[in-house]
Amino acid sequence: MDTINGKVAVLLVDDKPANLYALKEILKDTHYDIHTANSGIEALKLLLHHEYACCLLDIRMPEMDGFETAELIRHDAQVQHVPIIFVTAEAGDQKDLFKGYEKGAVDFLIKPLEPVVVRSKVKVFGDLYLQKIALKRSQDIEELNKKLILLNSDLQIANSELEHFTHIAAHDLREPLRRQRSFIDLLRDELSPDTLSRIDDLMRRIYCSSDQMLEMIDDFRTLTKLGQDDLKKSDVSLKEIIEDCLGDFQDKIKDRHVKVYFDIFPPLVSVFASLVRRLYTNLIANAFDHVPQGPFVMHFTVENVGSSWTYGVKNTGSCIPQDQLTQIFKIFRKADLAHKDGTGIGLSICKKIIDRHGGRIKAQSSDEGVHIQFTFEQGEGEK
Amino acid sequence: MKVINNNEIVMVDDNEAEIYIASMYLEKSKLKNPLISFNSGPDFLNYLESVKKGIKPIPALVLLDLRMPLMDGFQVLSEVREEPMFDEIPIMIIFSNSNDEADIKKAKELRANGYQIKPSGSEEYICFFNSLIDGV
């Protein structure tokens, strides 16, 4: 069911061209697409090929009159739904009216035709037709919606299976690597001190490679676990967590002469404590990753606008190209090729942690350095 | 958990490489016990039958890998613990990778004497074996 060029179509059937012309004139300023037929047979052909809002059918026609035409229309499953308006020359002829209704007419037009009446009756069926189309469309949309919901559900299942698979795969990948570590150690023990000193660098690189892979796998596992674990929020002091995390970097901070600053933090924030610990650790490690050498400043920021709190980690000494600012949170995307450490998963984990909290994370880069900011929720949670 | 005598330490693990590594490190550690190994639960339980009959001596300690294809560590553990004669044998469940809270709980329930995550590298392994020496 549809409109022709977006217009609703109406079919006029009369053997006399003059009558058709008159009807066309009456309907000329309406928005309907007017089709005409000279006979019942022609009308049927047109009805089979087009959708009409209604059919104005002259009763008095040679060969096949209006009633016979109507009967044929009513018997054809494809076209029987089209509303038929009989056009009759004789007013007050009861027999005609009854026969017409019997044959399936829904209305009558009596000659001489009153333009207002004609337009009004055609409009009724035109509007009805448009309503039918609108209903069909909304039904189609409902159908599509149902399909969409099913597809979405399938997608979620597939995604969760993928996560599960990755989790298992990471688990299993770890074991050969673990054994390799032992083999390397045992190999080392077999070598004489002379040989050892010559291949010292080589041994170190083998260890490094192994360690890197282990780290990556562990990060993968963390990434997949983040979606799965049941966690509870608790009220924590972010500053204390950060200071705790910094503890693991004490040696690096001293060696590199890193200056650490804190903005004023709210006393307690409601978060997933273990995840936030991981978040800050990753961001601190990320800062060290990005500033290859020399001293720099690390600033733990807090911004408060009304009830919304934005936290961040800022470091001097590095920058991220503007077109990379959103890419860095994607897995394995590293902003600059210069640094070799890091698994390429750390920031993805940060994003996932923030996602888990329902917050937002973003990166900014300027002359001052890189500032990664995030929220934990929309305005709630701070005390 | 410590070895109870100078007899064999038994290792049950489906992975041959794990056994090879363990035996190498056992040699380097201060433990004097020899190592015998089985690749599956049924094989180990067969050996225990010989111990029951007095053909073989009571082992000093059992290191039982958890993830094995035929019978997993827990199944083997429950079977061993059904025999009162073996109550004195210290059995340690070996976890690869991570310690799952549920697994640790189950190990305790099934009366394992301890659990250990598979060591990684020289230092960890030798340290672990040394910790099993009686009197250390």
Image: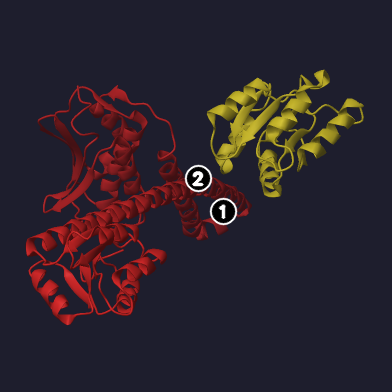
Chain containing mark 1: A
Mark 1 sits on what residue? A193
* A70 shown above or below A234: below
Q: Is residue B113 visible?
A: yes
Label whose residue precedes the other's in the sequence (2 or 1):
2
Query: Which residue: 53% across, 49% down?
Result: A169
Q: Residue A164 carries which label?
A: 2
**Residue type beneath disc 1:** Pro
Q: What residue type is labelled 2?
A: His
Please name which of the two marks, 2 or 1, marks the residue nearer to the observer: 2
- Residue A355: x and y in percent read 30, 41
State the residue in front, A111 or A132.
A111
Q: Where residue B120 sits: x, y (%)? A: 56, 42
Q: In this view, does A89 lie above or below A138?
A: below
Q: Is mark 2 on a helix, strand or loop?
A: helix
Horizontally, residue A133 falls left or right of residue A167, namely left
Identify the residue at image location x=33%, y=71%.
Answer: A69
Q: Nearer the viewer, residue B72 or A370?
A: B72
> What whole-number distance in Å separates the C-alpha atoms at marks 2 and 1?
46 Å
Q: Residue at the spot x=11%, y=74% of the render?
A: A22
Left or right: A8, with A117 as reference point:
right
Q: Where is residue B109 in the image (x, y as percent from the top left)?
A: 65, 21
Q: Colour of chain A?
A: red
Rendering quarter of residue B118: top right
For the colour yellow, the matching chain is B
In terms of image quadrants, where is residue A266? top left
Image position, residue A7 (x, y; %): 19, 67
